[in-house]
Image (cartoon, rainbow, N blue to C red):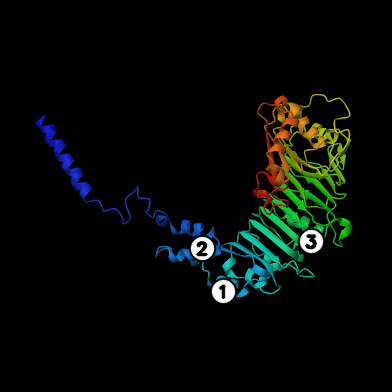
Amino acid sequence: MGVATRAQAKRKRSQQQSGSQEPPPRAGGGAGDPDLDLISLLPDGVLGDIISLLPTSDGARTQALSRRWRPLWPLAPLNLATRGGGGIVDEAAVTCILAAHGGPARRFAVSNLALAGLDGWLRSPALDGLQELDVSYSAAASPKPAMPPSALCFSSTLRVARLGCCHFPDAVAAGQVHFPHLQHLTLRLVNVSVHSLHTMLAGCPALDSLVLKNSYGFRRLRINSGSLSCFAVHYSDRPDKTEEIMMQELILENTPCLQRLMHGGPYGDCGMLVSVISAPKLKLLGRLTDGFGRLEFGGTVFQGLNLITMATTMRSLKHLALFNNALSLDIIIDFMRCFPCLEKLYIRTYTWGMENVWPDKPLDRMECLDLHLKRMVLAFYLGNKLHVDVASFFLLNANVLESMKLVVEPYQVNDRKWTEKQRKQLQLENRASSSAQIEFVTLLCFSCPKDIHELSEPFEHIF
């Protein structure tokens, strides 16, 4: 026992001596001290990435944090973004930043540009390896200037491109474009020929989303892409009210990965023809309106919102948005039959009243109502008999409905007496799904989202 006790005592003394030789904790506290600066212990490359994610002005201010951070800003990946307040871009400041920057480039975003300056900036060595390009000339410029060929210099590294208020470079039409890593492309107020657009798409084998906002110069767009998952088009003008050539026909010829097909804007859908030849994963479609020209998939044809021929169904579709001015359950039911696996249905109407809102034919059991429909939004809900009947139809027949959102005027949301009356008229006690909840909300936004590919629920921004 004595030997064991002496050995234990020796080990204890050794541990105490070893502990006494440990360096004292850093100023500011120990491991559990909330004031301990652990971020500064990260490698330079990681800190540089953090700085590059900050707005330009905030990134520059990191130099004042400590001596550790001071040399990082000039060498961090460049994230230069300016929106040109008052329509003026400080060209001297942009030139100075590019000249002084010694690190790689991540993002370059400038808008409201005059004609001079852009080409020189894009040729700057400071932008070598650029990943995100967001440039736009002034919307007031007439005629629209051509995007300089230097915009194509980043073809090997570019992942995101947003181009605005310009003519597309002629080099695109000549087939001199290959963007192997480009994932997101947005063209806003861009005049581009159909040949240039087709060539551009063919040169983007990794393209995930394509957004065309008020872009002109082509009537028919044929999409063949093995990678595209989201396509959105937005027009603010009527085809008969502008001298520009607007897209009037869309053909999805071979789009095996396409999941979202979106159409937005107050106009531009007048007479639009959409033919879906191959889009086996299409999950989200909208908005479709009364003014829509024609929608075809398989042998099924819609003229406007009216079903002309039903030869096949599309079971992949889960989200659908309809703008139906003359609100009709017959029309809505036809869409639910064609898309039997719908989970979310968005309906917008301006109708004040209409007779014969209930279906003209006896309602057979529907897979959509029995098994799938979980969420419904009815925008511009007025609380009149027509709208109450439509909302009640879904409450009384949708067996797995979880949520119904009724978009109303702000004063109606705050009118407790009105909302209680509506709940009573909607026969909530007889709802088919005991978990169905009703919510009265106001319209928060009516615009096409800027980065639609980043939104999990894009229709929430237009309903």
Q: Looking at the rendering, which quadrant does residue 299 occupy?
A: top right
Spot occupied by residue 190 in the image (x, y as percentages of width and height): 76, 62
From the image, tell me which residue sits under label 2: 59
Q: Nearer the viewer, residue 93 or 330?
A: 330
Spot occupied by residue 77 in the image (x, y as percentages of width and height): 53, 62
What's the mark number on residue 96? 1
Spot occupied by residue 132 in the image (x, y as percentages of width and height): 62, 59
What's the mark number on residue 192? 3
Q: Residues within 10 Å of mark 3 (few under 14, many from 20)?
A: many
Give yes or no for contact between labels 1 and 2 (Cβ–Cβ under 8 Å).
Answer: no
Q: Nearer the viewer, residue 145 or 35?
A: 35
Query: For this view, does 156 lie left or right of residue 285?
Result: left
**Residue at left 82%, top 49%?**
250
- Between the residue at mark 1 and the residue at mark 3, the CA separation in whole angstroms equals 33 Å
Tell me which label, 2 or 3, sits earlier in the chain.
2
Tell me which label, 1 or 2, sits earlier in the chain.
2
Q: Residues within 10 Å of mark 1 (few under 14, many from 20)?
A: few
